[in-house]
Image (tube, grey):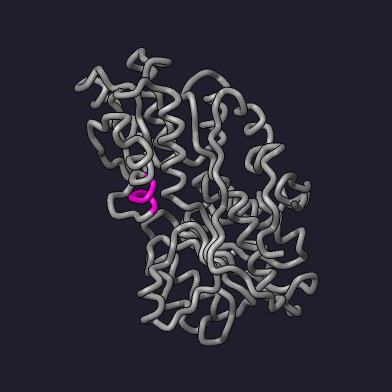
Amino acid sequence: MTTIIRKRTAGAAAATATILALALAGCAGAGEPTGSEPGASEPGAGGGGKIAFVIKPLDNTYFGAMAEGAQAAADEAGVELTVVAAENVTDDSGQASKLNALVTAGYDCYVVNPTSQTNLLTGLVPVSEAGTPIVNLDLPIDLDAAADAGVDVTTYVGTNNETAGAAGGEAMLGLVDEGSQVALIGGLVADPGNIARLAGFEKAVEGKLEITQTVAADFDKAKAKSAAATILIANPDIKGFFTPSGDMAMGIQQAVEEAGKTGEVAVVGIDGTKDQLADIVAGGQPAAIEQFPYLMGVQSVQACVAAMGGADIPDNVETPVLIVDKDNAQAALDAFPAPPEGFDVPNPFE
């Protein structure tokens, strides 16, 4: 296991802060690439190289942690990393335009965390034609559409969303009595990750818990809070909420607290954001599923380094998840956004 997964150097933290600040400023309109400028170098492990990192909005803590992990891994490997971000989670055309600018500049590897399963395919066509590695991060590209477009995705790095949802179901089963009523507050209805996480939860609790309703809150904290408040009023017998988003989990927990039901209604959300972990430590929501976007960023850069060096790499790498509760929440919070001590994850590309 490499130290970049566990610790960040001061230089890595400073570089990430610069990326985040510039990217947020760019959301106001400039949209220029941030991070390292392209420069001549020989790609490959230990030989430098230039990696383009195209991601969803950095003002979201989840995607910000991805960029932080990627920068730490790039610093460790001695490669240059340039980060561009969508302005919001539905900024399909804006994100595609930023990718196009990077393709024009030319990089040795492209990491893409698309806003939809197809929005970056046109821009990736010349990348694939040139034989340049493409690492798909987090949201899976539609492989059928990619094949039709002539895009060859080198590898996928991310959480198995159904596995994460199942972990949420396992956590909920440990918090509420069998037969209890629970509600699901999802994100965007058509989002594949959202669908898979909800499905994983449903399969895990099938025949054990009663899912009274499933509503969509668009990955929005305020909407999730409002939905939970409405459900709590309409159904006072609800004992738990599951959500595929850390930000939405915080909104739902606020609704639970305002209803005076802290400790009576369990909230379990995927992501394991810093706010979620701190809330568990403070005695708020009882559990979260930490899926380590920081580690995803690390592994995506590790994949690029291996591919640039000519190594054969697996088609798919699942970043592991961890159920966090009162017993390990402080350790998870202390290590955030990296995995806690004892949760060792080796470089899958070595």
Decide if residue 293 is on the left or right side of residue 189. right
Where is residue 215? Give x, y as percent: 25, 39
Where is residue 203? Give x, y as percent: 34, 42
Vertical order, 238 against 245 (above or below): above
> Furthest residue to the top?
260
> Furthest residue to the front?
207
Where is residue 253? Give x, y as percent: 41, 25
* Residue 32 visible in image: no
Vertical order, 216 against 278 (above or below): below
* Residue 324 visible in image: yes
Q: Residue at x 49, y 28 (%)?
A: 287
Q: Residue at x 50, y 37 (%)?
A: 289
> Furthest residue to the left?
234
- Span highlighted in magenta in the image: 193-197
Q: Tell me if residue 196 is in the magenta stretch.
A: yes
Q: Nearer the viewer, residue 108 or 36?
A: 108
* Quadrant in the picture for residue 169: top left
Of the 4 image quadrants, the one containing the C terminus is: bottom right
Decide if residue 49 is on the left or right side of residue 213. right
Vertical order, 252 against 4 (above or below): above
Q: Residue at x 40, y 23 (%)?
A: 266
